[in-house]
Each structure stands twice: as C-alpha cells, then as structure tokens.
Image (tube, grey):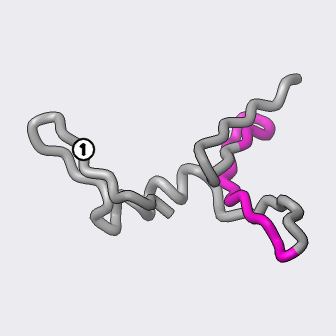
C-alpha cells in the first residue's frame, strides 16, 4: 500500500488507510523541520466553509491569503 503525501507551501496532507490528515510544517529554533498535526481534512474543510471562508457566486471562489 502506498501512502500519498501532498504538500502546499507549509501545509502537508497525508493519506493513511483512505483518510486524509492535515499537518503544518514548522521549523524550531534549531532549524529542524517538524510536522504539527492539525486535524482530519474533512473537519478542516467543514470548519473553513462554516466560518465563511469560502463563498461561491457566479462560479467565483474567494480564498483568503492564508487559509489556516
């Protein structure tokens, strides 16, 4: 079984057993990279939509500069 990993700037999405999880990529004071778990992707999307971060009108989508 292959694990899929998608990276977008400082956001990483991992697939584990058919479910997707969101991580933030950070560097500590020693410049060591670490991944900080945020939540399941479906819960992040659900929160983002319910908070008004995404709206559609005439097929346009508004996305803030920093999503998380």
The x and y percentages for residue 34 are 83, 61
* The one of 29 and 62 positioned closer to us in this rendering: 29
| In this rendering, position of residue 59 left or right of residue 68 | left
Residue 19 location, quadrant: top right
The x and y percentages for residue 29 are 84, 76
* The one of 43 and 5 positioned closer to us in this rendering: 5
Q: Is residue 16 magenta?
A: yes
Q: Is 28 rendered above or below residue 48?
A: below
| In this rendering, position of residue 11 left or right of residue 65 | right
Q: Residue at x 78, y 65 (%)?
A: 27
View extreme (bottom): residue = 29
Q: Which residue is mark 1?
A: 61
Label count reads 1
Q: Secondary structure at mark 1?
A: strand
Residue 40 location, quadrant: bottom right
Q: Residues within 10 Å of mark 1 (few under 14, many from 20)?
A: few
The x and y percentages for residue 16 are 79, 40
* Quadrant occupied by the N terminus: top right
The secondary structure making up most of the magenta span is strand
View extreme (left): residue = 58
* The one of 38 and 28 positioned closer to us in this rendering: 28
Q: Residue at x 44, y 57 (%)?
A: 46
The x and y percentages for residue 25 are 72, 58
Residue range (magenta): 14-29
Q: Is residue 22 magenta?
A: yes
Q: Residue at x 79, y 59 (%)?
A: 35
View extreme (top): residue = 1
């Amino acid at each position: 079984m292959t694990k899929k990993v998608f990276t977008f700037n400082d956001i990483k999405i991992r697939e584990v057993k058919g479910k997707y999880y969101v991580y933030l990529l950070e560097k500590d004071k020693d410049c060591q990279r670490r991944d900080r778990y945020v939540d399941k992707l479906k819960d992040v999307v659900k929160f983002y939509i319910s908070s008004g971060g995404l709206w559609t009108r005439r097929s346009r989508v508004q996305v803030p500069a920093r999503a998380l």
